[in-house]
Amino acid sequence: MSALIFGLVILAVALTLGLVALEDPGYVLISRSPYEIEISLALLVLGILLLLVLLYVLVRLASRTFRAPRDLGRWRAQRRHALADQATLSGYARLIEGEWEEAEMVLSKRLGQGSTPLLQCLGAAYAAQQRNDLDARDRYLTRARDCDPAHLVAVEITRARLLERAGQTDEARGVLEQLHEQGVHRHAVQGMLAHLLKAQQDWPALEKLLVETKRSGALPRAELAALRQELQTHRLGTEGESGGLSVHWSRLSRRERRNPLLQGVHARGLINAGEMDEAERFLRKALRRRWDGELVRLYGHVRSSRMEEQLRHAEQWAANHQEDPDLLMTLARLYLENHDRDKARSHLLEAVRRGGSREGYLELGLLLESMGESDKALQCYRRGLQAQKSTPVEKIPRLQAERATELVPVLGPGDQS
């Protein structure tokens, strides 16, 4: 574009000089004894312009000649970068397709070149791990650290993830703990470290991490609450075995003590410890505040010293929850404990009809077997095993209704009360 403009300017000047020379060409006399040169003014100006153009061309040509090695080197570097970027795209396409060997070969061919050397190294490391070549994976990760020190945290997080996937949980934990000690409060670091500690069941270390993470705000509240709930569930279970269940329960916050999951763990601990009266009072108080199916089922496993009063409380709940299969199961257990087998049997059958759970079928089978009805008990056991199999959510109500209907002829017309 610049050459075109320059040519147009020269042409315009030449045309202007030509028009001026037609009217008054003038002349220029150059005298140098013994010579004299006389030419027109227009011709002199035109000659000077041509000389300037020639000088410009010669200077440009000389400049390009001297700069040729540097320009050639720059062109080669740009070409290498373009080929390396193309290889990166091709290598990641092979990764997506699951061609691990080809992906590693393409990515490692121009390793460290191009505009994204970090992606090349990390992609090659992933491909090497997929081939179970852990030594090559570690070499690529080390190369990634050297290629892009500014993104060291990203490299180490990738290293931890690959180590965890390879089953090297101790090494992955070491990498994450080192980042944590260096003050890296990223969500990925804190979240991965917390889940590794949970998987290794290192509860003291997890509790310490959750305290620090709560101050830094690195984890979302929902994830932090879920991890803390997991921690408290474990502590309630283990301290219940060692006799410190009530002590630890009192240390929980008010909000945690109203969590149905933790309430269930505490109640189960009381039942296992033989503190039945305390478990009955605790569950009754919790259910008065909030109805929960798991707590209702646990109430049926409590054998307090006042079974008649316990049964009366459960019967009162039936006024508002008469179709609840969990309450029906609990009532059946309590009736059975109070030696009322007929009511226990009818409530178990109703619970099976409404819930169709494995637990209901098996308990009904045990009751029938204790009453000498072995054939019917065997049918219930079979239904219980069938109910244990996974079933799509949309089919559960229909299948439960079918199984309950099939159970009616098993028990006989007179047993449907």
Image: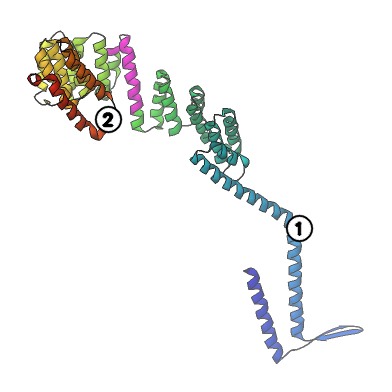
* Circle 2: residue type: Thr
Check residue 231 for magenta coloring.
Answer: yes
Q: Which residues are magenta?
A: 225-246
- Within-10-Å neighbours for mark 1: few <14, some 14–19, many 20+: few
The quarter of the picture where residue 264 lies is top left
Q: Looking at this view, is 304 or 134 the one in front? A: 134
Q: Position of residue 8 (x, y in %)?
A: 64, 76
Q: Is residue 198 magenta?
A: no
Which one is earlier in the sequence, the residue at label 2 or at label 1? 1
Amino acid bearing label 1: Phe
| Disc 1, SS | helix
Residue on which the image places disc 1: 66
Q: In this rendering, would 340 be left or right of 232?
A: left
Q: In what element is the residue under mark 2?
A: loop
Q: Residues within 10 Å of mark 2 (few under 14, many from 20)?
A: few
Q: Residue furthest right?
A: 34
Q: Which label is found at residue 391? A: 2
> Which residue is rendered at x = 70% and y = 51% of the image?
73
Q: Is residue 377 above or below residue 111?
A: above
Foreground: 154 or 89?
89
Prevailing secondary structure class for the magenta stretch in the rendered image: helix
